[in-house]
Image (spheres, grey):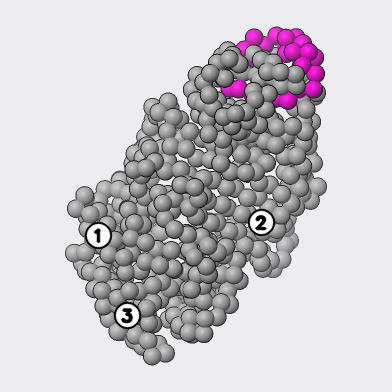
Amino acid sequence: MRSFFASLALVPSIFFASPTFAQDAKPTDLDKIVPADALVHIAADGIDPVKAALVDLLNAIMPGMGGMMIEGQVQQALQQPGMSEIDTAKPITFSFLPSETSIFGAPIKNTEAFQKALKDSGDEEVKSIIAGQGTSILSLGGDVKLDDLRKAGTAKAPSLAGPIRGFVNMKAVYSKYHEQIESGLAMMQAMAAAQSGGGSPPDMAAMIKGFAADVPRVDFAFIPSKSGLEIATALTPSPEAKGFIASIAKGQASSGTNKYLAAIPANSSVAFAGRLSPDLAQAYMGLVDLVASGATAEGKAEFKSLLERMFALTAGDFAVGISAGSDGSSMCTVGAMTCADKEKERAIMKEAASSSGAIQKLASVALHGGKMTAEYKAGAETIDGVEVDQVTYTIDASAVTDPAFKASLDRMTKTMFCEPFRFAFPAGTVVVAYGKGNGDAVKATLASLKSNTVSSPAAKALPSGMAFSASVNLVEYLKIIATMAPPEAAGMLGMLKNLPAGKDYLTFTAAPKGGAAEMRLNIPAAAIQSIVTGLQGGAMGGGPK
């Protein structure tokens, strides 16, 4: 009876479930069973505790909906024959093997009744192993023997704690399914190329293959509660890996309070902070493959050299804030970081602005026929006794044939390049600002750095001691995006403009831990609830104005 097994499968899939298996664990400990060759492993603390947490989360977002959306589905699944024998208070597990056999570990209250129900179902694809009184291991798609599981040993237990946890063996998944993955990505790239007016899209297959080689295993945990949802991942790089993940896993977290938090404007809806280091140059080269995959090897090498020299000069703490522009329809970005040598920094800026420089070479590829020119002026102005350099960027999109990309460049000109970029040099620091009203932002930042005053709620929401952290006032950021959106993107985005003032911050952190890059995303239920309520009001013609 496939519906029987599907019902069992539904329970862990609802909860994104994940498993664990220590080397000395007994086979009857379901939360410890992790087959050595598992491609994907999932375990949950139990149907009841996870269900309760998800109900709390959904009720916090949409009062009363938790029971309707979660409890109803679980109860329907448990009404299938034999499912009533599952002990819903104990852990459940799921593993997917290279043989394409799925294994479910289920705690059983009455094994005889459970076995009879399984036999009566008539589904010969579902096999059951009684691994001891109170434990059953079910398989779909192949025979699984308990002795074989014991002999094969176990995979390393999921490294992250949470009511729902697990891991994906990225290297093995890619090795087994690379043909399907590459075929699907090739179709997507062909469509992207057709829509981009003949541009050269990034080689996504190479990027996925590289990620699977660099990060052979990804652990995860989902932690739902009435306060929100936390999603945690631990990405363990291979010893020879380079790039952003490896730089975090092998790097250092920020020690103590970031000294540049005062640079973040008080009205910022988004804030970033962390540490810069020379090895990040390799990580940023991955972005080059995204935006300028057709660049020459020489152009990429020049850009990497520029990044390495820049990061060497700015190694240390940094902080950045993004806020609504002074005209209400654009954004202003301002940040501060270490500057070990002002004149060397200026030399790099001058090189970057050169018409024959690395940035210009990459831009000629990334802009799909557009042209970008830059004019650098050292000491163009003085703000509160501090020298300020300017770089004026101009984009000519007249030769761009793709209407959508051309419109994107026009918006970029109006929001990002509408004023000169400004670089101020207080002692040992460089303050960078761009966007509408960035001159006033530089002035305010210099004053707050001088007094060491942290006035931004976004800055205060940043977790400390991380290699990288970000905080986002989700409601306010969406309102900015809605205001900046083109006319054709009205409708749903238009409703976002009238959301009530946001006060809750989504946070993201990345830090080295046990040889892995541990990343955590915290999504506050209150922020999602504000968005859902505002959109519901807008759809009904009401809502706050």
The x and y percentages for residue 252 are 44, 58
The x and y percentages for residue 498 are 65, 65
- Residue situated in front as seen by the camera: 343 or 331: 343
- Seen at 27% across and 57% down, the residue is 304
Q: Is residue 524 visible?
A: yes
The x and y percentages for residue 360 are 25, 62
- Residue situated in front as seen by the camera: 437 or 193: 437
Of mark 2 and mark 1, the one earlier in the sequence is 1
The span shown in magenta is: 102-126
- Seen at 36% across and 53% down, the residue is 283
Distance, label 2 to label 1, CA atoms, is: 40 Å
* 459, above or below 286, in the image: below
Indicate left or right for 487 with 388 as reference: right
Quadrant that contains the C terminus: bottom right
Give the quadrant of residue 194.
Answer: top left
Distance, label 1 to label 3, CA atoms, is: 22 Å
Give, as a three-letter code, the residue at label 1: Ser
Q: Is residue 122 magenta?
A: yes
Q: Is residue 93 visible?
A: no
The x and y percentages for residue 352 are 26, 67
Quadrant that contains the N terminus: top right
The residue singled out by tag 3 in the image is 389
Q: Dot 3: few (<14), some (14–19), or many (≥20) neighbours within 10 Å?
A: many
The residue singled out by tag 1 in the image is 305
Of mark 2 and mark 3, the one earlier in the sequence is 3
The residue singled out by tag 2 in the image is 524
